[in-house]
Image: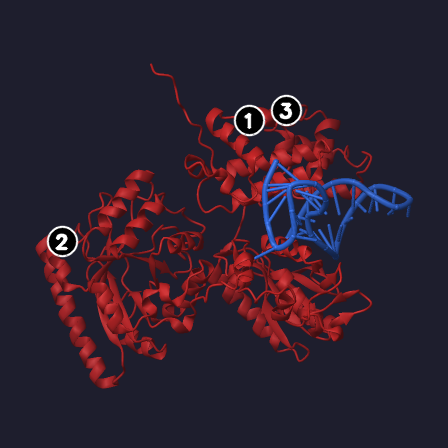
Amino acid sequence: MSKSKTVHVFTNSEIVKLLRDVAAALLIKDANRFRIIAYEKAADSVEHLTSELKDVWDEGKLEGVPGIGPTIAAHIDELFRNGNVKHFGKVFHGLSPALFPLLLVPGLGPKKAFRLTREFQLTNPKTVISDLQKLALRHKIAVLEGFGEKSEQLLLSGLESFSKGQIKENRMPLPYADRLAQEVIDYLQKHPAVVRVDVLGSLRRKVATIGDIDLAAMTENPLEVVKYFTKYHKLSKIIDQGEKGATILLTIGRQVDLRVQSKKSYGAMLQYFTGSKHHNIKLREFALKKGLSLSEHGIKAIKKLQNSNFKSQNYNKKLGLYEFESEKAFYGALGLPEIPPELREDAGEIEAAQQHKLPNLVTLKDIKGDFHVHSNYDLEPSHDLGANSLTDLLNQSAQLGYSYLGISDHNPSMKNHTEVQIVSLMKTRREKLERQFMAWKNREKKPIQPFYLLEVDILPSGLLALPNDAFKYIDAAIVSVHSSFTQGRSETTKRILTALAHPKAKILGHPTARLIGEREGIDADWNAIFTYCAANGRALEINSWPERLDLPDRLVREALSRKVKFIINTDAHHVDHLTNMKYGVDVARRGWVEAQDVLNTMGYNELSKWLKS
DNA sequence: GCCGTTTTCGGCCCGACTGTTTTCAGTCG
C-alpha cells in the first residue's frame, strides 16, 4: 500500500461554522477584538464565495479570498490536509462541546452560551437544547447573576424556535414576494399622507428568495401612516408598533415591516435598510477613510470636510449630521455614483463605483423577445403542454412590444413513439405553426417574427431526446435537464457537454435545474461548462420561472467573467407568464449583466444569424 | 488577524434594542 494522501473535504458551510466557532471561542476568552472580527470576516467571506473553498485551495489561491490572510490560510490548508487544525484545538480548549450548538439559538451569543454551559456543567451537544429547556422550566436560569425572569422566557422561546427548525430559512421566491409587496404598496399609497413607498432589503436588491417584506413610506405624518398600516385588511396580527414604523403578520403567514421617514432624511434611511449588511459595512469603512461616519440618519463629519457635496442647508444641528433626501445625494456625498441596489452585496461594486466602472445593467426595456415559450400544440410530449395557441402568444408578445417569439414546446415522448413517428410529428408541427403564423401576420400586420424551436430533454447519457432527422424541422434547440438530478459531478458535467456538442443545441435551458424550496440544483463543473459555451457559441438561459430563476445570480456573474452569452426567457406555459420576464432580468442584473451580454436584446436578423452560426 | 489612492503600522462600521442595572454588556441587523 502506498502512503495515503487523503485530502479531507469540507464544504463551505462547514468551514463557515468552524470559523464562527473560533471567533466565538476567542470572544469568550477575551481575545483581541479585532482578531475576533478577522475570523468573522473570513467566515462571511467564505459564506459569500461563488466557488467551493476546497477548489480555491486546490488552485493555491486561498489568500486571494478577501479576509483570508497568511494565518487563516495556513489554518485552512492544515484543515484540508489533516482534517483538523491544531491551533483551533487550543482555542477550543476548556470549552464544552455543548457550547457550539447553542450559538445558533436566537438571542444566545457566545458569552451567555458559555455562562450556561459552565454553570450547569452541560457537556453533551446532542442533548444541550433539551437540557436547557428543562432547566428553564424549573426556573433555574432566572436566579443566575446577569439573568432574570425575562431572560429565562426569552431563552425558552429561543430554544423552542430552534428545535422547531425555525432557524432554517423559510423563504419565498422573489416573484411571490414582489406580488405580495405590491398589494401592500397599493394599499399604502391610498393614504393621503403617503408621499411615496419603496421596497427595502433583499426585495429591493432582487435576491432570488425573500424572507420578510420590508417597505419604506415617505411621509410627514408618521403616526397616522403607521396606524393606517396596522389596519391592512389581510393582517393577522400586529407584531410590533412604534413611532418609526411597524411590523405586521399577514394572514398567509408572511411578515411585513414598514418604516416611515420624512422627506429630508429619506435617502439615508433607504440606503441603510436596502443593505446588504456587507455592502453597508464596506461602505462605512470606505467613508471612514474619508473622515465620514455613516448611519441610517445621515453622515457625520469626523474630520474637516473637503467635499462640496455637503450643503449647509442639509445640516441638522441637533443631531450633528448631514441629512439626505435621496440615495443619489447620499452616495454622491461620498464621491460615488449611485450604486444599483442589485449590486449591493460587497462583491466589488464599491471598488467599481470608485473607478466609475459600474456596469450599465440590462433592463426590461432592452428585451426584444421571449425565446422559451410553450404553446398548446400537442406534440405528445412527456412534459406539460402550454395553455394557449400560437395566435394567443403572438398577440400577447405584440402587446409587450416584442420583435420575435420563440416557440419551444417539449419534445415528443420517446417512450410512446418510434423515431419515424417523432420525425413525422415534428414535420407536421412545423408546417402547421408556419401556416398559423402566416394567417396571424396577414391579419394583424404586426412586426413580429417567429423562431421554431424545441425544448429537448438531455437524457442521463447526454444524448438528446430527439432523433437526428427531426432536428431539421427546428431552427435550434433549448436543451434541458429534466431527470436524473443526482448523478455525480463529473458525470453531470460530461452529460451536459455531450448534449451541447449537438450543432443545434444552442441554448442550455434552466442550467442548474434547481427548484427553489424544493430541489437543489445539479452538481456540475460549471467552469468547464462556461468555458465550453464561450468557446463554442452556446448560450446560457436565465429562466424567469418563479421557482427556477436559473441560472442563479452568482453563477451568472461567474459565467459573465468567462464571456458567455445569456438569453433571458420566461418558460411561459400561459400567456400570463410572459410578464415574468422582469424577474429573469433581475437575476441578470444581480449578475452584473449588460444588454450586450444578452442575446434577446438583439434584433431578429442578428439573433437569426447567431442561431445559425 | 487583515489590510493599504493618507498607512507595511496603526487602524479596524454603526446604532437600536433589551434586560439588568444605576452606566453597561450582550445581541442583532
Q: Chain of mark 1?
A: A
Rendering colour (chain A): red
Q: Quadrant of the C terminus of chain A?
A: bottom left
Q: In this orientation, does residue A104 appear?
A: no
Q: In this rendering, would A325 be left or right of A302?
A: left
Nearest to viewer (mark 2 / mark 1): 1
- Packing grade of label 2 (10 A; few <14, some 14-19, many >=20) is some
Q: Quadrant of the N terminus of chain A?
A: top left
Residue type highlighted by circle 3: Lys
User: Which label is found at residue A46?
Assistant: none
Mark earlier in primary sequence (1, 3): 1
For disc 2, the marked residue is A467
In this rendered view, identify the residue nearer to me: A301 or A462.
A301
Q: Chain of mark 2?
A: A
**Color of chain B here?**
blue
Quadrant of the rendered structure where residue A486 is? top left
Q: Residue furthest top?
A: A1
